[in-house]
Image (cartoon, rainbow, N blue to C red):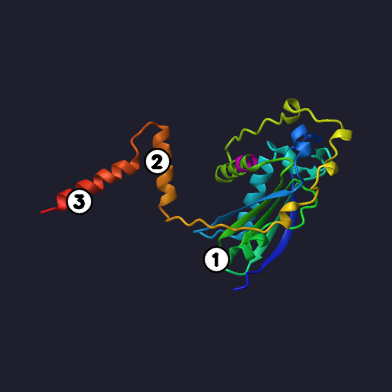
Amino acid sequence: MEITVEVISSEIIKPTTSTHGRYSFSFLDQYNPTWYVPFIYFYSVDHKPSKNEISNHLKTSLSRVLNHYYPLAGIVNENFIDCKNGGVLLLEAQVNCHLSQFLQNQNPDKFINKFLPDDVNNLVLSIQLNFFNCGGIAIGVRISHKVADGSSITTFINNLADTARNSNVNNVGPKVVGTTMFPPMDKAFADPSEFPPKKNVMSKRSKLCTRYMFRRYVPQEYRQRCEAKKNHQEDPANSNLLVHRKEAAESKP
């Protein structure tokens, strides 16, 4: 089955409050490559809210979280981020299949990039909200590696999810202290063009898509074990094992 993804709307989302005018790169940021790091999050939806409900909720939550992550709402320049004239590009797209059909596809790497924003126009962060026919969604994210790494974007996405689940949550933003710890160098010594590649080298590499399948109850069991370990409680898996052994012993004649 050929999977098609059609972009149906485009909007720039800005923080709810005024932002700083400029975010200067630290020494490490100056020498970071200019490629964009992709993430895609898939969600099944049981009660099937309308597209407008999902879209408006994401826009509101994103706008609030950006108050704490103001460099993400900017435009990448040579040695700084312009935070006044940017924003986050939010695309909405329609997928011509169900989420289960995509997940069962044997060659997901042929279609995976369709869930990501294509032309980011030097924006730090771009998001594509993809709607499946079943009501499920996929949220594709591209973020400039000059501003954030995997850990940073994961923290941002977790804060965004917390805000979407609870509108009253008070997220604590990151400390933007990169230039204090690693002061930038003079432009003459920090011209990124002297350190190739300047273009997105990720597009030149062969793409590998690896799929990990878990039984439905495994993630929940893992969370329970981590929570028990954090609270110095008995491992639920050991308790279940004891119960099963007791039941097995009682069933013997």
Asked if residue 150 shows in the view, the reply is yes
Q: Quadrant of the C terminus?
A: bottom left
Horizontal side of 27 relative to 223 (left or right) equals: right
Q: Nearer the viewer, mark 1 or mark 2?
A: 2
Q: Nearer the viewer, residue 31 or 239?
A: 31
Horizontal side of 142 relative to 81 (left or right) equals: left
Q: Nearer the viewer, residue 102 or 91?
A: 102
Q: Nearer the viewer, mark 1 or mark 3?
A: 3
Q: Residue at x 73, y 60 (%)?
A: 9
Question: Quick one: label 1 or label 3, which is nearer the N terminus?
Answer: 1
Q: Is residue 7 above or below residue 250?
A: below
Q: CA distance from mark 1 to mark 3?
A: 42 Å
Q: How far across and how far down the image is residue 234, in percent?
A: 33, 35
Question: Quick one: label 2 or label 3, which is nearer the N terminus?
Answer: 2
Confirm or deny contact between disc 1 and disc 3 (CB under 8 A). Answer: no
- Disc 1 crowd, CA 10 A, few/some/many (<14, 14-19, 20+): some
- Which residue is tagged 1? 134
Residue 243 position by quadrant: top left
Q: Residue at x 22, y 47 (%)?
A: 245
Q: Which residues are magenta?
A: 152-156
Q: Amino acid at mark 1?
A: Cys
- Which residue is tagged 2? 225
Element under disc 1? loop
